[in-house]
Structures are given as C-alpha cells and as structure tokens.
Amino acid sequence: MDGRERAVPEPAGPAARDAGDRGGRASPMVVGVVADPDLPVRLARELVQHLPAELARRGDPSRWQLEVLDDPFEAMYPDLEYLIDKAGRHVRDTAWDLALCLTDVPIRSNGEILLMSMDLRHRVALVSLPALGGLGIRQRLQKLAAVIVAALSAPDRGAAGRVVAEATARVRRSRVRIDAEDSGVRVVRDRVAGYPALLAGMVRANRPWRLFVGLSAALGSALAGTAFGVLYSSIWQLANAMGTLRLTAVALASVVALTVWIVLGHGLWEHRGPGEPAHGHDTALRNTGTAVTVGIGAGVFFVVLFLLTLAAVCLVIPPSYLASVLGGPVGFADYLTIAVMASALGTVAGAVGSGWEDDITVRKATYGYREQERRGLVDRGDRPRRS
C-alpha cells in the first residue's frame, strides 16, 4: 500500500472509472478502512486479506485495493453525523473511492442499537462491531462488509438501492430493521435480541482473557493461599463435610469477591458526571460490560488456579494418608473437592493481591480507559497509521 494522495472532488463509481481507463484495464477500486485501535484495526487487517475473495464469490468483477487507517476517529465525537462527515473527508481528500469505518464503541441512536449506517452520497459506511455480537464476529463482518462495498460502489443510487434491498431480504431473519434515509440507510438491531448481543460484543471487544494475563501479583497471592488449603488436613475435612451445593456456593462467592475487588480497587466503575445526560455515554451499559468482562476474567483465573491446585493435590497427598484423615475410602472425587476448596481460598487471597496490580494493566480491559487513551491521542495530535 502506498501513501500517495490526490485531490478528488467527488468519488467516481466503477462505471466512471472504467470509462476513464484508456489502457483497456479497469483501475482498482480503493477501499479505505478506518478503524479504531485494538480489535477493530486487527479485524480491518483481516478484511484486507479476505474481502476481495468474498466480493469475487459474489460475482463482482472489479479489482479491489484495500488500505487500513488506524485512527481513533470516534474519540471525543459521539455525534454519528460527525463521524460520517469525518470519514467522508477521507474519501474526498485521498485516493479512496469509498470508506468503511469500524469502531468498537456501542452506538445507540434514539434508544436503538445501531449496527450500521451507510451514506451513499459520500460513499461512507460506519459499522459498530459490538452490535455484531460476541461470537463469529469475523465471518459476520466479512459478509456485511461485502454487502456494504457492493452498495457503495454501485454506479448509481438505483443500483445501490437494489443491493440494499437484496441485503434487506437476507437479514430479515436476523431481527434487524432497515431504515431508509435521504442519502443512505441505517440498520438497527431488534431491542429484545439486540441488547444481549451488544453486551456480548462489548465483552468480546474488552477481551477478558487479557485481564488474567495481567494479574501476576494476584496469582502469586492466590498460589500462597492455595498452598494453605493443600497442606492443612483440617481444610480437607471441611471440604469433605460441606457437600456439593455448599462447596459450589463457596467457589462462586470467591469469584464474585475477586470481581468486586478488582472493579472497586482499580476504579473501573464509571460515574455519570453532573452535567452529563442520562444516556449520553451509556454509563450503565459500559459498567455492565465491565462487570461481565471482569467476572469472566475472574472465572478464568479460578479455573486456571483450580487446575494447578488439582495437580498439586494429586501429587502431594497420598491416597492412604487422605483416607486416614477422612476416615474412609477415598477416590478422585475427594481430590476434586479439596482442589475446589483450596482454589476458593486462593482466589480470595488473589483478590487481596490484585490491589497490587498496575492500574493501567487492569483498566485496558474496559471501555472507559480506552476512551480516555484515544482522547489523549486526539489531544496530542498523534498522526494515524496507514497500513
């Protein structure tokens, strides 16, 4: 990809480009993908590899060239129309023929969940990745991007309308609504099914497994607490006497304790400012996403700790000695019981140890920190990266 730029007063459609090509070979259509940092830019770079093939499968004969621009374009600008205008300037002022914008910010317009907004006049589309859900996001984005590019590159609005109509017929089963506008269309998700999918998409964008990697101090404290449960026979007897339901409740309580400790200890819970409207930054939605993200991270923490503890229990405690302590024959289920109890103790100890973690490491898994980071990029005037 080269970085050359040329002034283009109005984007030309494929027919105009083909007519102006005197060499007999159509010039490539240049698709600019403007993506927020982190997950959106990684998905954008995958689109560069797979979108041309997807368009070819749809029978599109055009030649395609994709460029990715890593730019926190949503920072400080929650107004949807502003985002479209900003992306439209990329199309007008560069060699791009059309632009596809990817953001990991959930967008709600008039209380509705926006999946995609497309401006046919400026040949720009904006996709909110969380609205695609948490699973299969790459495949869904690839198919949606192919429909968007086909519509934006249509030679006239009538042809674009036919593409949109075709796409509408296909996605009706997905419980979305297509709203026609003066210069484009909006795709809005059904509220009932949309909010769970939106929350799942937000958690996917937060990448909760990354939280576990950053909890090194918590893991050290957890291992120390687990050792207490592995080595002291009174803990074995207590675990054996608890029963399945009580022991499960203890394990869940330890995960909740770790979740709450991380959220409160690192200031992850956002509070609406005095002058901020109730729906302005979707504070409640983002707090819910943070709680679920940290909860999943804490669950992963417990599972990893449990597997390590189970290996230690099986290695350290001889069956004959365990049988003498418990006063009867023992089996693998008894080792599982001890490992769960010791892991619960270790998780509580890990909650205390999580207070020593670096705040930045933990906060990277939340929308609030990423928004502040991107605002800083805009304030410093850092230049976007083209790839």
Image (cartoon, rainbow, N blue to C red):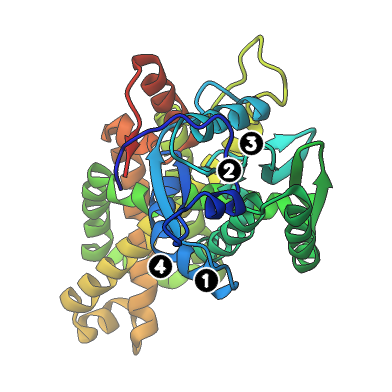
- The residue under label 1 is 56
Q: Is residue 262 visible?
A: yes
Residue 50 x, y percent position in the rendering: 44, 65
Q: For mark 2, does the 10 Å Cα neighbourhood hold few (<14), some (14 to 19), or many (20 or more) residues?
A: some
Q: Can residue 208 be seen in this view?
A: no
Q: Residue at horizontal 47%, vertical 45%? A: 33
Q: Which mark is residue 239?
A: 4
Front tag of 4 and 1: 1
Left or right, residue 358 beside residue 33: left
First reached walking from the N terminus: tag 1 or tag 3? 1
Q: Which amino acid does label 4 sit on?
A: Ala
C-alpha gap between disc 4 and disc 3: 66 Å
- The residue under label 2 is 12
Between 204 and 335, the one lying in front of the other is 204
Left or right, residue 75 beside residue 4: right
Left or right, residue 226 beside residue 176: left
Front tag of 2 and 1: 2
Residue 117 x, y percent position in the rendering: 68, 42
Front tag of 2 and 4: 2
Kindly state the secondary structure of the residue where label 3 is placed.
loop
Residue 21 x, y percent position in the rendering: 47, 53
Kindly state the secondary structure of the residue where label 4 is placed.
helix
Q: For mark 4, does the 10 Å Cα neighbourhood hold few (<14), some (14 to 19), or many (20 or more) residues?
A: many
CB-based contact (under 8 Å), mark 4 and mark 1: no
248 to 92, vertically: above or below: below
